[in-house]
Image (cartoon, rainbow, N blue to C red):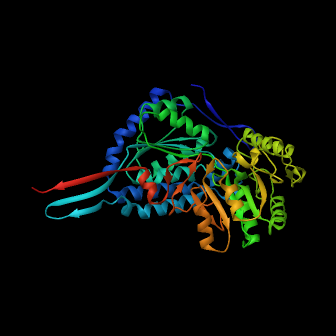
Amino acid sequence: MKPIQLISPVDGSVYAERTPLTRAEADAVVGRARAAQKAWAGRPLADRISLVKAGVARLNEMKDPVVEEIAWQMGRPTRFGGEFGGVNARTEYMSEIAAKTLAPLMIEETNSFRRYLAREPLGVVFIVAPWNYPYLTTINTLVPALIAGNAVVLKHASQTMLVGERLAEAFHAAGIPEDVFQNVVLDHATTEALIAARSFGFVNFTGSVGGGQAIERAAAGTFTPLGLELGGKDPGYVRADANVDAAIDTLMDGAMYNAGQCCCGIERIYVHERHYDRFVEGAVAWASGLKLGNPFDAATTLGPMANKRFAATVRNQIAEAVAAGAKPLIDPKLFPADDGGAYLAPQVLVNVDHSMKVMMEESFGPVVGIMKVKDDEEAIRLMNDSPYGLTASIWTNDYDVAAGIGARIETGTIFMNRADYLDPALCWTGCKDTGRGGSLSYLGFHSVTRPKSYHLKQV
């Protein structure tokens, strides 16, 4: 098998190299997982919760090397300290609700009948994780899957393949059996062959629309349940009654944080004509204050994109938009670290419209287009004019207005006066080309379990 190389965006060097499993080796992994799952599911729920929380605690003990490795693998500045806040909060919440969510729902318990609905694990859960938030996106499924009694096989993106190794190291050190949670390196062909062979009880994939389509094709006819979180083009809408300063700060952070490589990052902004000039001026000032550079420099607030080919996509979108009449408001010369490769200066575009790829196709980089709108109707029409639907951010001081607009937007989550955030008590889900299924909240446990009905009668 040809080795898979992890090319660091920091300096273009080969940071890690691993040989993917052969099909026979991968089948053996699945076999061990299946064999270990029943005993794992047979443990008391409290024990499984305790072991999972201990695994996350072990991961926290690795914080310093983990933060450094993330920077080398996908370029996030070390000043941001990794993903531990979200990892810990999501683990804690899912642990707290597990007993209630997984408990049988009693319909009748009398001398004649005992009728109830139970939930049981799906068996072996396969997680295909992305590189942009490599720990958080894994935890979203890994924690509830293990707590619910499943075995888990994790395949991480090649750009962050050391993350899977760290997670396995931490969870095994905490006492979770090695066959219950296995990290693997696989190529695309073997991944698809395993899915097609009905190796798993559930497949969770986070990545591109094309990747999700490949997963669906591989699973066709197997009836394997899938969770797919795919592309996004999340909008922000600044209404006439918005707090403009707060909107600038939050929406621009949502557009630029992690070099724009966020599943729910803000990629297009619609501003009421009353505030348009002020918002644009503030957005340009905000982005101009970023410091593009080496992620190990404490002053760096914008690191390189994870791969130079991702940066090339963003550059091409910007160039196409400018050629079609868009106006770039940030001079790349303000960011001398922009090397034409993975290091990419931020950009704010105006005079944009929906004929441009930068407003319709996922950018996943540090660029945002801003359009003027006259009212809610125009904003709603533009927000819905997208093949994607993950989140939308509405800026207003009225709960009812936000909820009313939100009810008309085709998306998975409606934010009011915030953006780019996952609340573990709410389901993380999308629609249209963003995919299907949901993680976190009590529904996250439903994704990794199946209902089972008991109709017991006394004679």
Residue 154 in view (yes/no): yes
Question: On the rendered image, what quadrant is the C terminus found in?
Answer: bottom left
Residue 337 at x, y percent in the picture: 84, 48
Residue at image point 51% right, 33% down: 217
Residue 395 at x, y percent in the picture: 69, 68
| Front position in the image: 30 or 56 | 30
Report whether 261 appears left or right of 23: right
Q: How many circles with numbers are drawn on the protein?
A: 0
Residue 335 in view (yes/no): no
Residue at image point 53% right, 61% down: 88
Identify the image quadrant of residue 239: bottom right
**Residue found at the very far front of the displayed protein:** 377
Residue 170 at x, y percent in the picture: 50, 50
Residue 294 at x, y percent in the picture: 77, 50
**Residue found at the very far left of the displayed protein:** 459
**Residue found at the very far top of the displayed protein:** 1
Identify the image quadrant of residue 187: top right
Question: On the rendered image, what quadrant is the N terminus found in?
Answer: top right
Report whether 176 appears left or right of 86: left
Report whether 98 appears left or right of 183: left
| Front position in the image: 304 or 369 | 369
Residue at image point 50% right, 27% down: 22
